[in-house]
């Protein structure tokens, strides 16, 4: 089910299954949930919501607030739920990830070992922090939503993050050891 705008409209439909939300609410929720593996900017969210409303896949309700700007809440329609279900059945399109760390390491010979080591160390620290966040988030979800039918699926995605960060930590340690070996070889040649 290809929609104009790529996967953004489908991500928005999925998020709106949780509750009616404004574009701002959606952006906040993304940063607290799927933002670990999927990003959407305000520049993608608002046009996506407009498109979905035009297609009848979401409904927009305007809340008038005295002395404040109007608040536009979007909720998914039954046609929107059907579109989401159809999209969820389509095979996943594999994408080549862009990874600046790997790009810099690929050309790492052109800078000092210490620069390469700094990049890897920063990445290792990022994944150490990520593991803590994933673990804490999983515990909090189990406390806050113990009976939510979506909980097992949320935990599956968190588990992916935990495994990925764990693998990255292992790779970082191996890479730091390899950088040390490269540095030692260079010193021995001199």
Image: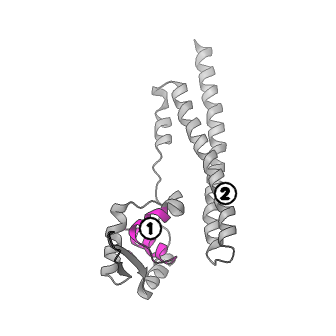
Residue drawn at x 58%, y 44% as measured from the top left: 126
Q: Marks 1 and 2, Cα distance to the nearest angstrom?
A: 22 Å
In this picture, is 49 found above or below 128? below
How packed mark 1 is, by other alpha carbons closer than 10 Å (few <14, some 14-19, many 20 or more), is few
Q: In which quadrant is the C terminus drawn?
A: top right
- Check residue 25 in the rendering and tell me which mark sits there, or answer none: 1
Looking at the image, tell me whether mark 1 or mark 2 is earlier in sequence order.
1
Q: Position of residue 29 (x, y in %)?
A: 49, 65
Residue drawn at x 42%, y 85% as measured from the top left: 77
Toward the viewer: 101 or 95? Answer: 101
Toward the viewer: 71 or 85? Answer: 71
State which quadrant residue 9 falls in.
bottom left
Toward the viewer: 141 or 117? Answer: 141
48 relative position to 87: left or right: left
Q: In which quadrant is the N terminus drawn?
A: bottom left
Asked if disc 1 and disc 2 are in contact, CB closer than 8 Å, the reply is no
Question: For numbered disc 1, what is the local secondary structure?
Answer: helix
In reply to whether residue 29 is colored magenta, the answer given is yes
Q: Which residues are magenta?
A: 1-30
- Check residue 136 in the rendering and tell me which mark sits there, or answer none: 2
State which quadrant residue 177 falls in.
top right
The answer to whether residue 3 shows anywhere in this view is no
The answer to whether residue 66 shows anywhere in this view is yes
121 relative position to 84: left or right: right
């Amino acid at each position: 089910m290809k929609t104009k705008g790529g996967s953004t409209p489908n991500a928005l439909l999925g998020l709106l299954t949780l509750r009616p939300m404004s574009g701002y609410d959606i952006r906040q929720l993304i940063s607290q949930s799927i933002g670990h593996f999927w990003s959407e900017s305000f520049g993608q969210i608002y046009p996506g919501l407009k498109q979905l409303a035009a297609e009848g896949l979401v409904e927009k309700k305007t809340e008038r607030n005295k002395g404040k700007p109007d608040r536009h809440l979007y909720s998914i329609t039954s046609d929107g739920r059907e579109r989401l279900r159809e999209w969820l059945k389509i095979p996943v399109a594999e994408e080549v990830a862009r990874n600046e760390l790997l790009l810099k390491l690929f050309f790492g010979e052109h800078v000092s070992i210490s620069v390469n080591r700094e990049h890897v160390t920063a990445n290792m620290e990022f994944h150490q922090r990520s593991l803590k966040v994933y673990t804490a988030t999983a515990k909090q979800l189990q406390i806050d939503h113990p009976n939510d039918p979506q909980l097992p699926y949320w935990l599956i995605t968190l588990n992916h993050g935990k495994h990925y960060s764990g693998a990255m930590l292992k790779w970082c340690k191996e890479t730091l050891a390899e950088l040390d070996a490269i540095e030692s070889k260079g010193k021995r040649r001199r």
